[in-house]
Image (spheres, grey):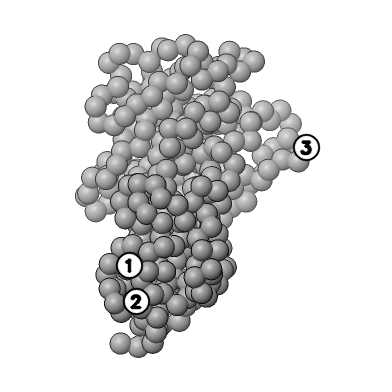
């Protein structure tokens, strides 16, 4: 078998890391490819779930003695501490690895230091190979770890004229079945799904992951979070069933903002403490508006259906915009057709001042 370049191996490692999205928190997603001294792939691995073996350990187990004298290509700096598993830096040293290529350094102070340990053992360490791709694939964990609260995605569905429901309140279904399956796949990559109590009262959603394209069930259901200032969520609401864990976040528990609502920064801090690194804001134009007005949204995923309603609730309200100069500018990073609908991914630009 012909050898591969380090660049090719890192591209494969990034692909492997993505397989852990939604199941590794509070740990990162990580992929690893091991090359023997001749550049042939002898082991691959990814971190599949918190508490399970790390990507390097999986790849080393697959490679065995063939890894000795070879190169480990890994998307994130190997950990240097003992938690539920041992340090990957030590495992790489003991395996006789000669070189370690790392895409992104570990920002977690408790686990970082692996590169220094490897160098101290005489192993060559290179940083920055395909760093942008590895960063993008692990953006939620990296962002959350660096700042101390979750990476927040706002997802919405609307018609071409921006309506989330008809004038009589009906909204099933704005988008196609294909788009709805895509939403379930998106839910499967996050740790928590948030909705306002108004959405729960109006639509009684389940907020679970289901109907995935391949027919499989989610390995781990995200935490369902109802943002409910005064505790109005009915006892029989579907979010209270046993299909997934649920937290009814009240102002009394989390903190109250000047308008008497749940204080969002406190909510995100509490979610981070619960191990949430990526959160999906789904339900409620007012809740979405509050997150956007506070500058707490990192990414927007909009599903736009080729339909017109002419009247009815808007997909977004009360975002702190009263004039055109206050508009929240966004950078569109992807537009993909999903069935008859469009999925638009955008990044809000941070406001100055």
Q: Position of residue 236 (x, y in %)?
A: 27, 16
Labels 2 and 3: the sequence-earlier one = 2
Q: What residue did someone put label 2 on?
A: 67
Q: Is residue 63 rendered to the left or right of residue 303?
A: left
Who's the residue at 58% across and 13% down the image?
260
Evaluate whether residue 132 shows in this view.
Answer: yes
Of marks 2 and 3, the one in the foreground: 2
Front residue of 303/109: it is 109
Q: What residue did someone put label 3 on?
A: 353
Who's the residue at 49% across and 51% down the image?
111
The CA distance from mark 2 to mark 1 is 9 Å
Of marks 1 and 3, the one in the foreground: 1
Q: Position of residue 279 (x, y in %)?
A: 46, 38
Badge 3 element: loop
Q: Quadrant of residue 71?
A: bottom left
Q: Quadrant of residue 32?
A: bottom left
Badge 2 element: helix
Evaluate whether residue 12 shows in this view.
Answer: no
Who's the residue at 51% across and 20% down the image?
254
Badge 1 element: helix
The CA distance from mark 2 to mark 3 is 52 Å
Labels 2 and 1: the sequence-earlier one = 1
Labels 1 and 3: the sequence-earlier one = 1
Front residue of 29/162: it is 29
Evaluate if marks 2 and 1 touch, with contact meaning CB atoms under 8 Å apart. Answer: yes
Q: What residue did someone put label 1 on?
A: 59
Picture quarter with the N terminus: bottom left
Numbered label tally: 3
Picture quarter with the C terminus: top right
Q: Is residue 185 rendered to the left or right of residue 270?
A: left
């Amino acid at each position: 078998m012909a050898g591969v370049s380090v660049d090719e191996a890192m591209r494969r490692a990034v692909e492997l890391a993505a397989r852990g999205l939604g199941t590794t928190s509070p740990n990162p997603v990580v992929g690893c490819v091991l090359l023997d001294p001749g550049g042939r792939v002898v082991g691959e691995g990814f971190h599949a779930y918190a508490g399970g073996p790390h990507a390097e350990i999986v790849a080393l187990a697959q490679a065995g003695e063939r890894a000795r004298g070879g190169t480990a290509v890994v998307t994130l700096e190997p950990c240097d501490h003992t938690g539920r598993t041992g340090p990957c830096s030590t495992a790489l040293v003991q395996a006789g690895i000669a070189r370690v290529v790392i895409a992104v350094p570990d920002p977690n102070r408790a686990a970082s230091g692996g590169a220094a340990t490897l160098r101290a053992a005489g192993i060559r360490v290179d940083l920055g190979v395909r760093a942008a791709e590895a960063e993008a694939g692990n953006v939620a964990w990296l962002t959350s770890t660096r700042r101390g609260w979750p990476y927040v995605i706002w997802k919405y569905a609307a018609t071409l004229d921006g309506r989330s429901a008809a004038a009589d309140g009906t909204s099933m279904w704005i988008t196609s079945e294909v788009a709805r399956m895509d939403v379930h796949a998106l839910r499967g990559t996050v740790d928590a799904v948030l909705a306002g109590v108004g959405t729960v009262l109006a639509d009684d959603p389940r907020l679970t992951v289901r109907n995935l394209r391949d027919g499989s069930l989610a390995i781990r259901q995200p935490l369902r979070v109802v943002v409910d200032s005064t505790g109005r969520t009915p006892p029989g609401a579907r979010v209270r069933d046993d299909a997934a864990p649920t937290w009814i976040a009240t102002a009394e528990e989390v903190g109250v903002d000047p308008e008497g609502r749940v204080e969002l920064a406190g909510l995100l801090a509490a979610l981070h403490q619960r191990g949430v690194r990526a959160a999906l804001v789904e339900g409620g134009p007012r809740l979405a508006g509050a997150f956007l007005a506070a500058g707490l949204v990192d990414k927007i995923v909009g599903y736009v259906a080729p339909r017109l309603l002419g009247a009815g609730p808007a997909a977004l309200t009360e975002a702190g915009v009263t004039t055109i100069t206050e508009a929240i500018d966004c950078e569109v990073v992807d537009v993909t057709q999903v069935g008859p609908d469009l999925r638009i991914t955008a990044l809000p630009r941070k406001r100055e001042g």
